[in-house]
Image (cartoon, helix red, strand yellow):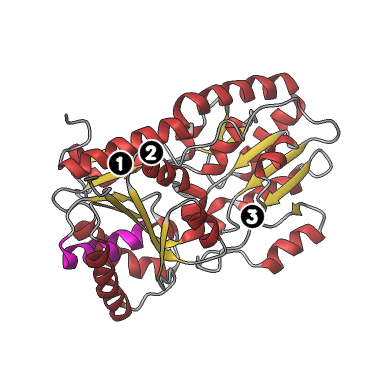
Amino acid sequence: MNKAPRTLVFLLTEDWFFASHFWARAKAAKAAGWHVVLVASPSEATARIRETGIEVVPVDFIRRRLNPVAELLFAFKLARIYRRLRPDVLHHIALKPIVVGGLAARLSGCRKIVNAPVGLGFVFSSDKVLARLLKPLVSIGLRLMLAPPGAITVFENPDDREALAKEGMVHWASTALIRGAGVDIDAFTPGPEPGGAIRVILIARMIREKGVADFVAAARTLRGQAEFVLVGAPDPGNPNSLSEAELKGWAAEGLVSWLGPRRDVADLLRGAHIAVQPSTYREGLPKSALEAMAAGKPLVATDIPGCREAVVDGQTGFLTPAGDVAALAGAIKTLIDDPARRAAFGQAGRERAVTYFADGVVCAQTLAVYEAAYAGLKPGDG
């Protein structure tokens, strides 16, 4: 009699983030024989995910909700789902799923957990009063739920790994480093530079910590020397989201073109000359940076955790101080004026993406973590 497949359960706040960042790994797990289940708030992505044979359990996971009683009740609801699904391994992604999902795992008796902080989020990235008030509470939740016995914590960059280990939130031996969400190196490929005006592109959620305002300020400084393009949607679930009015206002000034959310990112990159990732606070490892590198585009990014993991300064692009618009504009200007350097950076970035960030590399590393979690081993054991 055939043995039933092991069950792997992903918990995220919203399924669109799973579709953009974890779908390749889920499909790799399914191909390796796991029964894969996604628990998340549904969106238009739900049907597409189900078409690939992944079970989706829709829940009302509200990212902006801050009511402790409501979150406790939601944890009990998740615990009932976990008892029904009987997961062999749980993969909790981002801070809120780690805390709430960790409580649900304890309530349901699930002990084999992979936690992925994927960046430290609004609470750690904002200086707003709300963020400062929430930070101690979230820190307590992370201390309790991030690294329970038997759990493995996966980081996207070494800076976050070292920071949380230093704070005593994780034990180094129970952590793993997997650089980012991976990139489809067959879909994102280099090509000849397009003709016409130099096009500088920023692809990101339209939230303040992505450095969108700094990108626009650099566009103002370099007005008339290149076309500046924003791609992405505001994020109503994030308190630091830009508004459509702000984005349309910048476009009306003629500083940038705002294209909104797009699925043809590979085509947009083929039509660009320079990619920019001017984040103002620590990232996990931005997927759009990996896509730009795979597409052979030189990348100007800020010298912060996550971005500095992607860019090798002076080889694949430039790193500039976060929030320094003059330095950002200067780095972009250097690339506008130097096609040979654009080509050299682009080629080196493509090579780095293929070596370290390709889907195949990231999926293999992630499957090894699942096997370690299932076997009760630490990463690297066995």
Q: Residue at x 27, y 62 (%)?
A: 85
Q: Residue at x 22, y 58 (%)?
A: 145
Does residue 118 show up magenta in the picture?
no
Helix, strand or loop for disc 3: loop
At label 2, the amino acid type is Asn
Query: Disc 3 and disc 1: Cα gap in Å?
Result: 28 Å
Say what amino acid the circle numbered 3 marks: Gly
Q: Tell us which disc is closer to us: 3 or 1.
A: 3
Q: Main secondary structure of the magenta part?
A: helix
Foreground: disc 2 or disc 3: 3
**Region rendered in magenta:** 94-109
The image quadrant of residue 314 is top right
Query: What residue does disc 1 label?
Result: 161
The residue that mark 2 highlights is 157
Quarter of the image holding residue 45?
Answer: bottom right
Dot label at residue 232: 3
Q: Find out whether residue 95 is within the magenta segment.
A: yes
Q: Earlier in the sequence, mark 3 or mark 1?
A: 1
**Is residue 21 or residue 110 the one in the foreground?**
110
Question: Residue 312: percent from the left, percent from the top?
Answer: 51, 26
Task: Check contact, mark 2 vs mark 3: CB within 8 A.
Answer: no
Q: Is residue 69 above or below residue 189?
A: below
